[in-house]
Amino acid sequence: MIVEKQVPLQAHNSFGIVARAQHLARVRSEADIAALRASPAWAALTQDMPPFVLGGGSNLVITGDVKPLVIKVEIPGRRLLEDSPRGWLVEAGAGENWHAFVQWTLEQGWPGLENMALIPGTVGASPVQNIGAYGVELQDRFHSLDAIDLSTGASFTLDAAQCGFGYRDSVFKHAPADGRGLGLAGRALITRVRFWLPKPWKPVLGYADLERKMAETGITEPTPQQIFDWVVAIRRAKLPDPAVIGNAGSFFKNPTVTPEQCADIIAREPKVVHYPMPDGSIKLAAGWLIDACGWKGRGVGNAGVYEKQALVLVNRGGATGGEVVTLAKAIQTSVYERFGIRLETEPVVI
């Protein structure tokens, strides 16, 4: 196992921030992980700090050269494990590109992931963030995953309940600080993920953007491919292509409030965009809150708020991670001072 030194990371983070990994190892199989742990470099590089697992780098803000050992996950593979009257069970390697995987499942005739088209990143990162879009979250289609405990080298499998999924949250985002071993941040490396796509397929069309597409096209019963195409078109119209303008997609989570809190905000801001949730809470559109505070198009240094979508922070050219973080904190302060809402960030800051 070769551990590379001083590896440029600009191409490995969708913000396009210039930084280096002091040490980086690429793994394409479980055997590679075992070889890495057995290498002389492992003990020296992980003695003082846990390694940092890197997927597609699409949910990441790098604020300087990365000191921990970076493990770049490039495990490939796609396969159908089960085709039954109840559904399809599909597996993908953690290094597979998420959007390409969604596209492949549709090409094989296995629908169910189409609402999550064009979400950047890798399959292995999808359960970490519990990604979701247009009415479907990963947990709705998740079956199980395989992972390796980097501290012991042991392999293990988790089902949905064990992953502790929440809104853009999972057990992989929390450190085991309470001593009960409930958190897996910095400890687990996901190798393979399995998805359950139920039969018969049912479209998920509750979002306004999709309803607008139905009205525009006159198609009231879209196919999975049509929904995929619509979602791709909607996302491309709203969100900048990271290959052109560096960004990490939605930078802030949509906050949830009680009906009473929402009523109080509506009394002051009647146009606030909000959605009732199944549990009785109300989800507010973070992008609307940020836009209402006048941030759209503004920036700090070379980091800015995207002109077409206030939820997205962008690299206007040469932005540092520090500028991105400073901008995010300024936005959080503005929203809290006006609405009393604390926005939470989505990307990992390292």
Image (tube, grey):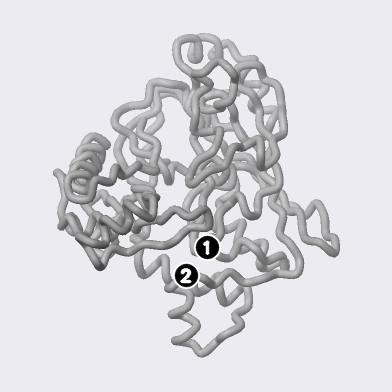
Query: Residue 332 location, x and y as percent?
Result: 24, 43
- Point 51% across, 50% down: residue: 131
The N terminus - image quarter: top right
- Point 47% across, 22% down: residue: 69
290 in relation to 329, above or below: below
Instruction: Say which element carries label 1.
Output: loop
Q: Quadrant of residue 345?
A: top left
Q: Which residue is identified by label 2? A: 207
Q: Quadrant of residue 107?
A: bottom right
Q: Quadrant of residue 94?
A: top right
Residue, far front = 260
Residue, far right = 84
Q: Is residue 180 visible?
A: yes
Query: Residue 167 location, x and y as percent?
Result: 49, 46
* Residue type pointed to by label 1: Gly
Q: Which residue is identified by label 1? A: 135
Query: Residue 152 location, x and y as percent?
Result: 65, 16
Query: Residue 116 location, x and y as percent?
Result: 54, 60
